[in-house]
Image (cartoon, rainbow, N blue to C red):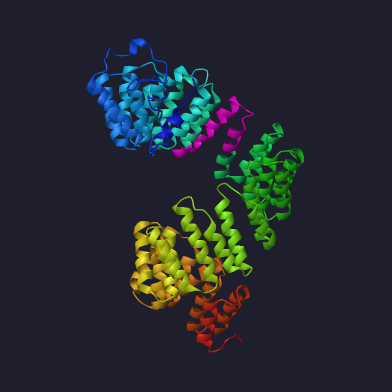
Amino acid sequence: MKFKLLSVLLLVGITACAHIPTPKEGNEEPGELVEQEEISPQNLPKQELTAPILFDFLVGETALQRGNLDLAVSRYVKLTKTTRDPRLAKRASEIALHAGNPFAAEQAATLWIELEPDSTDALQTIAAILVSLGKLDAARPHLEKLLITEKDNVGPAFTQLNQMLSRNPNKVAALQLIQHLAQPYKEVAEVHFAISQAAWFASQHDLAQSEMQRALALRPDWEIAAIHNGRMLQRTSSDEANAFYRNYLTQYPTANEVRIAYARALISSDHHDLARRELQVLRDKNSDDAEIMLAVGLLAAEMGDFDVTESSFRKALDLGYKDQSAVYFHLGQIYEETKRNDKAIEAYQMVKSGARYIPAQIRYADLLALNGQVQQAREHLHKLPAANDQQTAHLILAEAQILRRTKAHQEVFKLLNDGLKKLPDFPDLLYDRALVADKLGKFNILEQDLRKLIKLKPDNAHAYNALGYSFAERGTHLSEALKLIKKAIELSPEDPYIMDSLGWVHFRMGNLSEGLNYLNLAFSARPDPEIAAHLGEALWSKGAKDEAKNVWRSGLEKDPGNEILLETIQRLTKKKAID
C-alpha cells in the first residue's frame, strides 16, 4: 500500500473539484451505492434504503453535480451519521476535502475510521486532515499505526510525512512529533533526514546537522543528503561547506547533483576559477545529458560566462531537452544581456508554451518597441491570451511600459485606468497609475492609489516610499513624508532608492547635515543619476559647488539625457551644461 498522506493533504483547501466520481457511473440502478474499494462485509451496516435516506442521497448528488459543495457536504455527513456506512463516510470525507472544508472532512473521516478502523485509506485521510489542522497530538496515534503498516516502505513514508509537517506553523511541535515517530526506525537514513529538516525549520541547527550526518553515515552515497549537509555548513562557513563537497566528490566523482551544488557554492563565495573547473568537469563527463548542460549554462550565466552559457544551452537543445521553451527563454535573456537584441527576438519567438510563454512574449514586444516598432509591439500584446487576472495585469503593465518610453503619459494613464476597472485591487496597476498620475500632476489620484495600495499590502515598502517622496518633492506634508519613508526603510533597509528619499526629505525639511549623510550612503550604494541629482543639489546648497558638479558629471556619464538630473543642473547653475 503506497503511503499517500501528502496527496490527501493537498486536497485540503481546494475550493472546487473538477470531477468527483458519482455512485451512478455505469449500469448501476439509481440510488445504488458503488463500492470504490473493497470493504469487509462485517463493516457494513444492516441498513435498508429508506425514502429519507434516498432523498438525502439524491439531494447530495444533485448538489455535487451543480457545484453546490456546501450542500453536498452537509447531506453526506448527515447520511453517514444516519446509516453509519463506511462507504458514505469515505465519500463525505472526499467531498469535504474537495470543497475546501477541512473541519467537515475531519468530522466525516473520524466517523470513517470509527466504522472501519483497519482501513489504510481511512487512516491516511484522518491523519492528513488532523496534521493540516495543526492537531498533531490527535494525529500521532494514526501516524504510528500507518508507519507500522508501511514497515517495508518506512523511508518514503517519512519523506512524505516531513513534507506535510513542514507546512505546520508550530515547527517545534512538528519536530517533536517526528522525533517521537522515529523511535522504532533509527536505522533508516530517511528518518534521520526527516528529523534534520524538521530541526532546521525549528531553528535547532546543531541538531539538524548531526542528524543529517547520521543519515549520510547510513547512506553515504545519498546525494540529496549530501547537498543538504553542504547547505547547512554553508550557513556558518563557506570554507567548511566547500571542503565537505570537495571530499565527497573525491569519494563519489560521478555525483553530478553534488558537483552542481559545489559549483553553486563556489560561485556564491566568489571562487569563480574553481567553479569554472567544476563546470568543465560536468561538461566533459556528461556531454550527452541535456539537463546537466542546462544546469551548467545557468551557473555559467551567474558568473557572466555567456559564451559557455550559450554553447551549453545550444547543446541542451541539440540533445532534446524536454522543455525547449524554457531553454529558448533563457537564451533570450542571455542575448539581451549581451546586447544582441535581434537574436533575443528570435529566441523569444521560439517560446511556444509553458509558464514562460507570456513572459517571453512580453519581452519580444518590448524589444520590438525598442527597435521603433511600437505599434506592432502593442498589437502583439493585444493578441496574447491571458489565462488569469495576473497575466492580464502583466500584459497591461508591459504595454504601459512601452508607452511610457514614448512619454505618452496621458495614454498610459488611460490604459491603466481601464485596467483598474477590470482589476480594481491589483497592486502593480495601482502603483503604476500612481506614478503616471505624478507625471500628469494628478496628485489626488497618486495619493488615493498609494494609500489604497498600503491598505492592501501593508508590507509594500515602495508604496510608502513613493507617497513620502511625492510629498517631499512637492514640499508638503513633510512630517508625514518622513514617517512614510522611515516605514519604507524599516521594510527594506538596504534599498538605496529609499535611502535617497530619506536623505531628500531631510534636505527638504532643512536638516542639511542629516540629508547629506543619507544621500551619500545612497549614492555610494548605487550611483544612479537621480540620486546624483539630489546629492548634487544638497552639496550645492552647502556651498560645495565643485563637489556637486563632480557628482552630476558622474550621473551624466551613466545617463546623459536624464531629465531630473538635467533639470536640476539647469535650475541651479542657470546653464544647460556643467563647466
- In the image, is residue 200 above or below residue 496? above
In the rendered image, the residue lying farthest to the bottom is 574
In the rendered image, the residue lying farthest to the top is 42
**Residue 495 locus on image (x, y percent):** 49, 62
- Using residue 520 as the reference point, say whether residue 508 is left or right of it: left
**Residue 269 locus on image (x, y percent):** 63, 50
Viewer-nearest residue: 96 or 212: 96
**Residue 48 locus on image (x, y percent):** 26, 15
- Using residue 298 as the reference point, say whether residue 132 is left or right of it: left
Q: Is residue 225 magenta?
A: yes
In the rendered image, the residue lying farthest to the left is 52
**Residue 9 locus on image (x, y percent):** 42, 32
Which quadrant would residue 255 be assigned to in this image?
top right
- In the image, is residue 236 above or below residue 32? below
**What residue appears at the point 33 percent right and 13 percent down from the top-left corner?**
43
The image quadrant where one finds the C terminus is bottom right
Which quadrant would residue 89 be assigned to in this image?
top left
Residue 566: in sight, yes or no? yes
Viewer-nearest residue: 294 or 227: 294
- In the image, is residue 119 above or below residue 200? above
Viewer-nearest residue: 273 or 305: 305
Residue 465: in sight, yes or no? no
The magenta segment is 200-229
Magenta segment, principal secondary structure? helix
Picture mark count: 0
Q: Is residue 420 magenta?
A: no
- In the image, is residue 35 above or below residue 362? above
Viewer-nearest residue: 123 or 138: 123
Which quadrant would residue 461 be assigned to in this image?
bottom left
- Using residue 179 as the reference point, say whether residue 235 is left or right of it: right
**What residue appears at the point 74 percent right and 42 percent down from the top-left corner?**
283
